[in-house]
Image: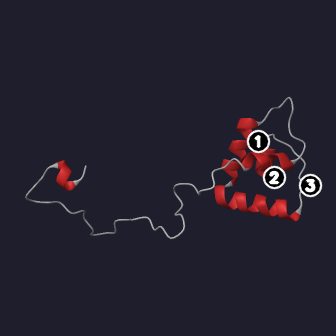
Amino acid sequence: MDALTRAGMLVGWRLTEEEWARVTVLAARWGTDRLVEMIARRWDPAQPPQSARYLLRIWADLPARPPADEPDGNIVPLRSGPGRRPFRNPERSSAYQNGF
């Protein structure tokens, strides 16, 4: 609410408990900056929405998958630790043998 207000986008926030729960989940998942940015792209100052329910419809267009920087499910991103070096084939030095 505060981030939208600071951006100059005022709407009514009379929502049901279920709708508030959706807002909370969306903010935790995507961050308030992303949610405000998405609303700002569709905001029409000549005809602003009256209710935050309209914002929920806009946010429903967000992809079902989490952002790329967040692991999905049981996928663990690979990270090289200190002292780890990628394998290099000393006998065949081509990029095809050792990666790009």
The residue that label 3 is drawn on is 14
Q: Which amino acid, by three-letter code, is at mark 1?
A: Ala
Q: CA distance from mark 3 to mark 1?
A: 20 Å
Front one among 1 and 76: 76
Colour mapping: secondary structure
Tag 2: residue type?
Answer: Met
Q: In the rendered structure, which disc, 2 or 1, sits on the residue that comes first in sequence?
A: 2
Crowdedness of circle 1 by 10 Å Cα count: few (<14), some, many (20+)?
Answer: few
Q: Is residue 77 left or right of residue 38?
A: left
Above or below for 80 versus 58: below
- Pointer 3 or 2: first along the chain: 2
Quadrant of the rendered image containing residue 38: top right
Q: Is residue 51 left or right of residue 96?
A: right
Mark 3: which amino acid?
Arg
Position of residue 74 relative to residue 36, above or below, is: below
Q: Which residue is mark 1?
A: 7
User: What residue is drawn where x is 12% and y is 52%?
Assistant: 93
Residue 74: x %, y % from top left: 50, 70
Q: Earlier in the sequence, mark 3 or mark 1?
A: 1
Q: Position of residue 82 (x, y in %)?
A: 31, 69
Q: Residue at x 76, y 62 (%)?
A: 24
The quadrant in which residue 90 appears is: bottom left
User: Can you identify the residue that label 2 sits on?
Assistant: 1
Q: Nearer the viewer, mark 3 or mark 2?
A: 3
Residue at 70 percent of width and 53 percent of height: 32
Residue at 52% over, 55% down = 68
